Image: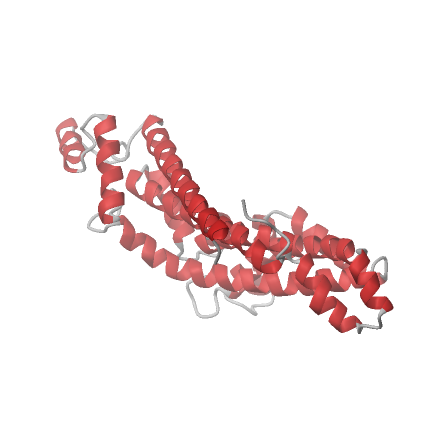
Amino acid sequence: MNTKTLLYILKRIGLAILTVWIVITITFFVTRAVPGGPFASEKAITPAAKAALEAKYGLDKPLLEQYGTYLSDIVLRFDFGPSLKNRGRDVIDVISDGMKTSAELGITAAAIALVVGVVLGSVAALRRNKLIDRVVMVFTTACISMPSFIMGTLLLILFAITFHILPANGASEGGLILPIITLSLSPMANITRLTRSSMLDVLGQDYIRTAKAKGVSGVKIIFGHALKNALIPVITYFGPMLAYIVTGSLVVEQIFAVPGIGRAFVSSITDRDYPMIMGTTIILATLIVIMNMISDILYKAVDPRINLE
């Protein structure tokens, strides 16, 4: 690793830390600015009991003091605090439990989307304007246009309710199959279209025509030259997409009752569970920032012509 690359990585790490801090700050003050509070929905709670709960969790202190305490707890101890609604449990424990399922769901869906998308995109580019190209384009357009809650509901009705092939509950055995398919369809369609357009551009380059003129085999041209350079936009898209999927699709996890971090995030918003909202938002933002940074660094590995600045 040369000095220029090292400086670029250090610069990106610094920007990543700054981005996460901005997310923390905005989320903290916005959640407190929304009318209501975590104890507003408590049944038959007296003003004295409400004041006692606020004092217990430090919500009675000035807002800037709360912010400073929260920031120091995260930086020094990686402590997101206790959940206000899941009494007796820390936020990090709730997130860890949810992430186990969400990670399994998301990584599998992302892997399927990447492999199938690259294959379909390459085939469509090599068979441009042929029947298979048109079929692939129609299929991917439908997957992109259809919202995930419509796609998930359709799969649920077909495979779980009508034909009884797969379970509808994401917590049961085999219950992640339908959520995985639902999560993978839209990114797979995007990767297919990115790969196709990029492959068509690469196949028209001079060095590809030169390789063909020299008698290089089609397989070597595709996998040794064209596909490698065509994957650059796919890498750009795949990093943030992986972070988003691993964190869990809120809608998909709700439809299939998947016990992932997405359901915890939705519940935290409706319950005004400030620490849970902060914790899940920080985890999501950190994953997206890290995957963006890794994607930018991988550009150099895929295409040595790219200069890191």
Residue 104 percent coordinates (x, y): 45, 63
Q: How is the image coloured?
A: secondary structure
Of residues 162 and 71, the one drawn nearer to the viewer in this rendering: 71
Residue 105 percent coordinates (x, y): 47, 61
Q: Is residue 132 left or right of residue 164?
A: right
Of residues 248 and 127, the one drawn nearer to the viewer in this rendering: 127
Instruction: Please give the name of the residue rendered at 33% of the width and 29% of the height, measured from the top-left corner.
Output: 29
Q: Is residue 185 left or right of residue 13?
A: right
Please say whether residue 214 is visible from this viewpoint.
yes
Instruction: Please give the name of the residue rendered at 70% of the width and 53% of the height, measured from the top-left corner.
Output: 193
Q: Is residue 209 left or right of residue 306?
A: right
Residue 259 percent coordinates (x, y): 39, 57
Of residues 203 and 254, the one drawn nearer to the viewer in this rendering: 203
Q: Is residue 51 left or right of residue 238?
A: left
The quarter of the rendered structure image containing the C terminus is: top right
Q: Is residue 9 above or below residue 179?
A: above
Instruction: Please give the name of the residue rendered at 42% of the width and 43% of the height, measured from the top-left corner.
Output: 16
Instruction: Please give the name of the residue rendered at 33% of the width and 39% of the height, measured from the top-left corner.
Output: 271
Residue 160 percent coordinates (x, y): 55, 64
Of residues 223 and 179, the one drawn nearer to the viewer in this rendering: 223
Q: Residue furthest front?
A: 3
Please say whether residue 241 is visible from this viewpoint.
no
* Circle count: 0
Quadrant housing residue 58: top left
